[in-house]
């Protein structure tokens, strides 16, 4: 029996709603898993092979979830971000690998992966033995690479954490990756005190904006580097409103006069921490601004260039370089420590110190066909791949009508 037939057989076991249309399966062609017509039920954004997301992603309809088994819950995803790492996962170049979603297809020779690592789910139904969650509670995923670009999912209780109340959907949907990365990098490397200075590049990214806000809440001063663009003054103003002390373009960083300016800004105080999102030449230049015994923490490599540092920084300034990966932080910490961090970040958000990330909600509508939804998502990923998108995209995959 072909793998697609095995998948069709697996789907046939799900209960059919009255009036639900029979799934008409086609063999995937051009990596499109399209089913026609659209099922009344759910939809996920899936892929079956690694590659350029704009080519390998498809919309995939599947029926309503059956009632949740004991110690699990059925959740509806409200919003799920498209983070840069999600793209790397689909490309197959990210160290954290997703498992195939066997609820969509059990055939081992035809794995189906659902995109997305982070997301906000609303509890729709709980299984026997579930006491800590109730219908309508909001949850975020603790299991990495859970496949959040979907309208619904059955989750084990151990794979989710309840979200503290009082957050917006956008805040809750993005609370497990970027804000904790910013928070931990500000706390785990240099012992900073109020009035201390830090430098960072990629400062207008979601992590960078969280760094600016958390640093401002702690009384740290930030020098923030960004790429030049037509509306650079508007972007500078925006980052300053979030709490950035100074915002500087990489072109300005290349100018030797910047070092003297920075000395005036800091009053000659050593800069103790540098955060690197980008690597490449701009990071070499940024590292030269660091003072004695500083820490340079790399968490991204958006330029796709290597990191090169003058040896003199190590010899004469005792520079320490580190990598930070939030996934590793989570796997080294207890559930209580994760909960504590979630509560701390939620409190910053509720107090207005950590705002909604700049975002755009991208909706895959419930009445769209899988073919048109696939085209829409691929076009979006192609645009995101070109860079300078300017906003975090939060995906809303509606239940199919
Ligand atoms: N290590 C960790 O635990 C961890 C956690 C979260 C995120 N990350 C990584 O951090 C990075 C940023 O994530 P994010 O969610 O903040 O992304 P984001 O909101 O999409 O921001 C991306 C940032 O990178 C810049 N950028 C993109 N392409 C660039 C290039 N070719 N040269 C220079 N700058 C470039 C963007 O500037 P423009 O606006 O000018 O394009 C923007 O500042 C990603 O690499 C992500 O994987 C790592």
Image (cartoon, rainbow, N blue to C red):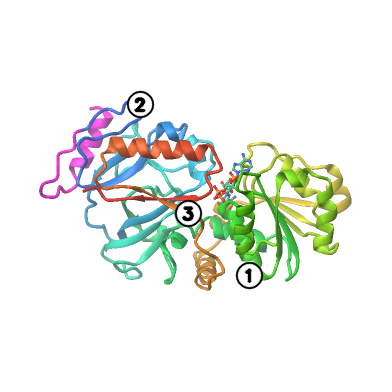
Question: Circle 2 sits in a helix, a strand or a loop, which is it?
Answer: loop
Residue under circle 3?
359
Residue under circle 1?
217
267 in relation to 114, above or below: below
Direction from residue 258 to residue 298 in the image, left or right: left
Is any part of residue 112 visible from this angle?
A: no
Is 160 in front, or is 57? 57
Question: Circle 1 sits in a helix, a strand or a loop, which is it?
Answer: helix
Report the residue at 66% width, 44% height from top.
228
- The 10 Å Cα crowd at callout 1, few under 14, some 14 to 19, many 20 or more, is some
Is 307 in front, or is 204? 204
Question: In the rendered structure, which disc, 2 or 1, sits on the residue that comes first in sequence?
Answer: 2
Question: Circle 3 sits in a helix, a strand or a loop, which is it?
Answer: strand
301 in relation to 294, above or below: above
Instruction: State how far apart marks 2 and 1 are (Cα).
Output: 49 Å
- The 10 Å Cα crowd at callout 2, few under 14, some 14 to 19, many 20 or more, is few
Instruction: State how far apart marks 3 and 2 are (Cα).
Output: 31 Å
The magenta region covers: 1-24
Quadrant of residue 219 within the rendered picture:
bottom right
Residues at badges 3 and 2 in contact (C-beta under 8 Å)?
Answer: no
Report the residue at 24% width, 47% height from top.
400
Residue under circle 2?
30
On whether residue 173 falls in the magenta region, the answer is: no
Q: Is mark 3 within 8 Å of ligand 1?
A: no
Q: Position of residue 33 (x, y in %)?
A: 30, 33
Q: Position of residue 208 (x, y in %)?
A: 61, 55
61 in relation to 65, above or below: above
Tell me the number on the disc at residue 16.
none
Residues at badges 1 and 3 in contact (C-beta under 8 Å)?
Answer: no
Question: In the rendered structure, which disc, 1 or 3, sits on the residue that comes first in sequence?
Answer: 1
């Amino acid at each position: 029996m072909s793998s697609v037939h095995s998948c069709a057989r697996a789907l046939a076991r799900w209960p059919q709603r009255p009036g639900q249309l029979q799934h008409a399966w086609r063999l995937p062609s051009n990596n499109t898993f399209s089913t026609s017509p659209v099922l009344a039920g759910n939809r996920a954004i899936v892929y079956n092979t690694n590659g350029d997301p704009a080519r390998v992603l498809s919309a995939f309809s599947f029926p309503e979830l059956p009632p949740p088994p004991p110690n699990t819950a059925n959740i509806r995803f409200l919003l799920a971000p498209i983070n840069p790492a999600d793209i790397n996962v689909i490309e197959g170049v990210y160290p954290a690998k997703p498992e195939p979603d066997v609820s969509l297809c059990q055939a081992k020779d035809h794995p189906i992966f659902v995109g997305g690592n982070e997301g906000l789910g609303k509890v729709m139904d709980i299984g026997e033995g579930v006491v800590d969650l109730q219908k309508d509670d909001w949850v975020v995923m603790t299991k990495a690479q859970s496949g959040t670009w979907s309208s619904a999912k059955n989750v084990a209780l151990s794979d989710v954490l309840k979200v503290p109340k009082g957050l917006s959907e956008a805040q809750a949907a993005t609370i497990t990756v970027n804000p904790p990365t910013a928070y931990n990098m500000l706390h785990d490397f240099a012992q900073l005190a109020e009035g201390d200075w830090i430098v960072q590049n990629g400062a207008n990214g979601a992590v960078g904006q969280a760094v600016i806000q958390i640093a401002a809440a702690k009384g740290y001063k930030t020098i923030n580097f960004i790429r030049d663009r037509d509306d650079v003054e508007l972007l500078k103003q925006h980052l300053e409103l979030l709490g950035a002390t100074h915002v500087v373009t990489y072109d300005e960083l290349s100018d030797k006069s910047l070092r003297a300016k920075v000395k005036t800004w800091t009053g000659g105080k050593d800069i103790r921490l540098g955060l690197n999102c980008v690597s490449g030449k701009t990071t070499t230049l940024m590292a030269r601004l660091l003072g004695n015994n500083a820490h340079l923490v790399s968490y991204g490599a958006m330029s796709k260039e290597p990191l090169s540092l003058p040896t003199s920084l190590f010899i004469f300034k005792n520079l320490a370089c580190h990598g930070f990966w939030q996934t590793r932080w989570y796997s080294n910490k207890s559930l209580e420590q994760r909960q504590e961090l979630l509560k701390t970040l939620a409190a910053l958000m509720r107090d207005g110190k950590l705002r909604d990330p700049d975002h755009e909600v991208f909706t895959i509508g419930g009445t769209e066909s899988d073919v048109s939804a696939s085209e829409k998502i691929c076009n979006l990923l192609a645009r995101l791949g070109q860079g300078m998108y300017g906003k975090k995209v939060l995906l809303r995959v509606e239940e199919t009508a």
